[in-house]
Image: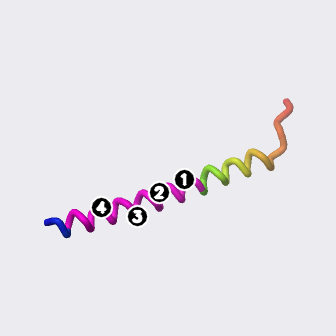
Amino acid sequence: MFKKLLILAGVVGVAAVVFNKIKASNDERALWHEATTAPDLR
């Protein structure tokens, strides 16, 4: 029982790290897109 909980906690931890890395990558990509596009001066 304890071994299953430990494995589950490890899987959840890895999923959280992957989620945070993907979110950080998307946020950085959005910032670069905003910084490098021409302003809309209409």
Q: Is tag 4's residue or tag 3's residue first in the polypeptide sequence?
A: 4
Amino acid at pointer 1: Lys
Q: Can you tell which of label 3 and label 2 is closer to the viewer?
A: 3
- CA gap, disc 2 and disc 4: 15 Å
The residue labelled by disc 4 is 9
Amino acid at pointer 2: Phe
Q: Is tag 3's residue or tag 2's residue first in the polypeptide sequence?
A: 3
The answer to which quarter of the image holds residue 22 is bottom right
- State if disc 1 and disc 3 touch (CB < 8 Å): no
Amino acid at pointer 3: Val
Q: Residue at x 78, y 46 (%)?
A: 35
- CA gap, disc 4 and disc 3: 9 Å
- CA gap, disc 2 and disc 1: 6 Å
In-image side of 26 versus 42 (left or right) = left
Q: Bin the neighbour count of mark 2 within 10 Å (Cα to Cα): few under 14, some 14-19, many 20 and up.
A: few
Residue 39 horizontal/vertical position (percent): 83, 39
The residue labelled by disc 2 is 19
Q: Can you tell which of label 3 and label 1 is closer to the viewer?
A: 3
In-image side of 33 versus 20 (left or right) = right
Q: Residue at x 74, y 45 (%)?
A: 34
| Secondary structure at numbered mark 4 | helix
Q: Which numbered disc covers residue 23?
A: 1
- CA gap, disc 3 and disc 2: 9 Å
The residue labelled by disc 3 is 14
Q: Bin the neighbour count of mark 4 within 10 Å (Cα to Cα): few under 14, some 14-19, many 20 and up.
A: few
| Secondary structure at numbered mark 2 | helix
User: 8 above or below 40?
Assistant: below
- Front-lying residue, 32 or 37: 32
How does the figure colour the protein chain or chains?
rainbow
Residue 27 horizontal/vertical position (percent): 62, 50
